[in-house]
Amino acid sequence: MVTSTWGPDSVLGAAPDAVRRALAELPYDEYRVLAAVHPNAWYGHGGWQIRNWLKPCLRAGLILPPPAGETWKAAICAADAFLGDHGSLSLYAAARGLPGLLASFGADTVAPGSPMAWLGERLPRLDPVRPLAAQLAAAVALPSAAARITSRPGRSLALLRTLCYRHLALPEPQFPCVPRPVAVPEPAPPGTPVGPALYVDTRVTGREVAVRRYPAETQRGAAAHLGADVHVVADAAEPDPRLRALADVLVARPGADPAAVLARNPGCALVAGPGPRLVLRDGREFGVPGGVDPAVAASALLAVLGEGLDPAGEFALRVGGAASALRLLRAPAGEADPGFLGPDAAQ
């Protein structure tokens, strides 16, 4: 979770690239990234402006809940780590025991000696050079800050209600004041029908293929989190012609003819789909087993062929922490070019 308060010292004001980095460097199939932005920023700039600033990140999968509602509370309950600033959500996240990094911090606006000031002294700052995943791993190893945030864990709601009614000189309600479970957020409305183009990093070890994917639009220059042999997977309807031309794998739309997709895109090595099928430029065709994303299977097939291996037989396919069996079924076709996508294909 990325938390941003309002003002020039907030994450969006001082370090907006932190949101892009989270999406660019953390594997697409292993992480979800949510930005919880302070209502003052939403209402000060307007929802259109906030969404427009973050539009490339939204296309790459960023969750950006509006300020009304309790999605930010659900995010704190669900998050594994946070990138924050001097806003209250950073304090709430730390109080829940989440490891975190500070992407910015308005020290001049924080009361000396307060829990927030202590948090600002303790939490590591986001390094603009080191890979983000390594920084989060180091933050996880630090002792939890929860015990220093409050001396009355679990009692703040009741204590604050008593304090408020005392100041109002009103009798406090007799019913108990206890926290209730946060509602599960409503599903997000459908996004664009064209998914994000992805940089795909593959590793073949024996009969195992590991696949890691990263949104292409959020990448900037040389990146330590990407391997040397990444390839690009894009929708055949990708509106950015640069990404479409770079794509080694194109995902065909329903009803499309793979041969026509290959003819229109001379840089494409294979087409995934329509349906559970993979079609190589040399005419070979493979079927994809149920439960496996054809786009992921296409990346695995490229990796296997790039190593000069026979794709026949079963491979262990690993995407993030999930493993499944991948058996690509060869469909009848003409003779294949033996040099196509062999070990020296990158030349």
Image (spheres, grey):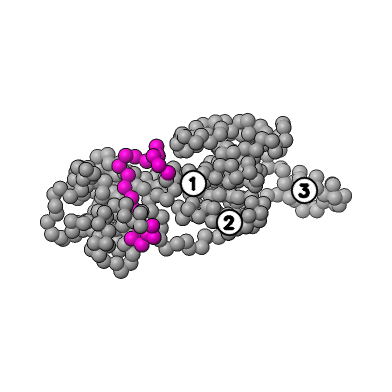
Q: Say which element carries label 1.
A: helix
At 39% from the left and 37% from the top, the residue drawn is 224
Left or right, residue 276 beside residue 40: left
**What span is in magenta?**
220-240
* Residue at mark 1: 20
Left or right, residue 33 beside residue 285: right
In the rendered structure, does residue 228 fall within the stretch colored magenta? Answer: yes
Left or right, residue 156 beside residue 259: right
- Cα–Cα span, label 3 and label 1: 39 Å
Q: Say which element carries label 2.
A: helix
* Residue at mark 3: 161
| Of 272 and 340, the residue lying toward us | 340
Q: Give the foreground label among 3 and 1.
A: 1
At 59% from the left and 38% from the top, the residue drawn is 104
| Of 100 and 337, the residue lying toward us | 337
Q: Name the kind of residue labelled 2 in the image.
A: Gln
Could you classify mark 2 by the number of other residues whose Cα lies within 10 Å: few (under 14), some (14-19), or many (20 or more)? some
* Residue at mark 2: 49
